[in-house]
Amino acid sequence: MENTAYLLLENGRVFEGKRFGAQGDITGEIVFTTSMTGYLETLTDPNYFGQMVVQTFPLIGNYGVIPSDFESNHPHLKAYIVREWCQEPSNYRSEGNLDAFLKYNNIIGLYDIDTRELTRIIREHGVMNARIASSISDLQAEKDKLKGYKITNAVLSVGCKEMQIAQPDDSEYHVVLWDFGVKSKILKSLKSLNCRVTIVPPFSTAEQIIALKPNGITMSNGPGDPAENTGIINEIKKLCNLKMPIFGIGLGHQLLALSQGAKTTKLKYGHRGANQPTKYMKTGLIYITSQNHGYAVVADSLPKNAVLSFTNVNDGSAEGINYSDMPAFSVQFHPDAASGPLDTGFLFTRFIELMKEGC
């Protein structure tokens, strides 16, 4: 269990650690999250598709594995890197331990790594490729395997493959949830507000969505470079012309902006954690939010029909957009609060109000 493995970074740094979870060597994009709790939500968040995730909080696994906290059916990340993992969790809801969970899902784990130093490197140099290797006897050969790695087909890899329906037919509102890698808490939030939810795959067309006769559309979070999804962006343009209530979250926020002519950019090291401060422009209030994204909408590229509603307090990046010519708005963060604070849950109520006005 304590066999040695090496973490090789694209900038040349090498860290020695110990294995847990699945065995093997792997390459991915390395990122960090600052969440102090919610490691199960992190592990099962589809936004981490193709990435190696570093937990800045030092002790992980202390409350075990709790399936009801999962954000999807299984992990989508490449590897999981921690300072220390708890081998004997203590929680009345726990149904297993982290090591067994990673083994079952074939996710490579690495511990006994100086995650503080590792995080500082990522903050300084930015997100980069990394590799977990069993040996560095031929270090150059292992480093060569880092070159050219790129996350591709992210949305199609994590989105559902066929339509699904949740909640009884007698619900007050019918919402189409466009699945680009949706987290389960978004679905739960909509259901709690008396919405019947039809989940549709990422490759759905505007015509197919319109045929379902929804009161509104929620466009979900998801992984990867938003600008790659040109087909989806074109379908969103068609829906926007119909002036149907739309609520974009995470990747959905970025795709909606791209459909209106805005641009997106890759952040140096992204926003990942449950403690990201955002400013609500309408009131000046600061909300603490849960976030997980590596790209952002370029605020200076917004078209005339788009107005910033939230900004990131740390770097000033766009965190929310309102649209003046259609009943649509979007946010970069996760108002479903998984895992994280409940501060911005009122945005779901706002979406309900838009649908009510359209009825």
Image: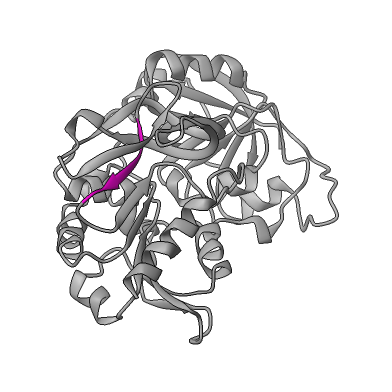
**Most foreground residue, 314 or 147:** 314
Q: Position of residue 341 (x, y in %)?
A: 61, 42
Please name the colour scheme applied to the rendered image: one colour
Q: Going by the image, does 219 lie left or right of 333?
A: left
How many labels sit on residues?
0
Question: Is residue 285 in view?
Answer: yes
Q: Residue at x 69, y 26 (%)?
A: 58
Q: Left of 217 or right of it: where is 71?
A: right
Q: In the picture, which quadrant includes the N terminus?
A: top right
Image spot of residue 319 (x, y percent):
38, 36
- Vertical placement of residue 47 versus 197, above or below: above
Residue 2 occupies which quadrant of the picture? top right
The residue drawn where x is 28% and y is 52% is 153
Q: In the image, residue 181 lies at what x, y percent?
A: 41, 56
> Is residue 264 highlighted in magenta?
no
Depicted 163 relative to depicted 115: above or below = below
The extreme bottom residue here reads 170
Asked if one can make out residue 176 in the rendered structure from this viewpoint, the answer is no
Residue that appears at 26% across and 45% down: 226
Image check: 215 left or right of 338? left
Q: Residue at x 45, y 21 (%)?
A: 314
From the image, give the main secondary structure of the stretch colored magenta: strand
Examine the rendered structure and indicate whether residue 31 appears above or below residue 258: above
Q: In the figure, residue 131 lies in which quadrant? A: top left
Asked whether 321 falls inside the magenta stretch, the response is: yes
Q: In which quarter of the image is the C terminus?
A: bottom left
- Residue 210 pos. (x, y %): 24, 76
- Residue 302 occupies quadrant: top left
Residues rendered magenta in the picture:
318-324
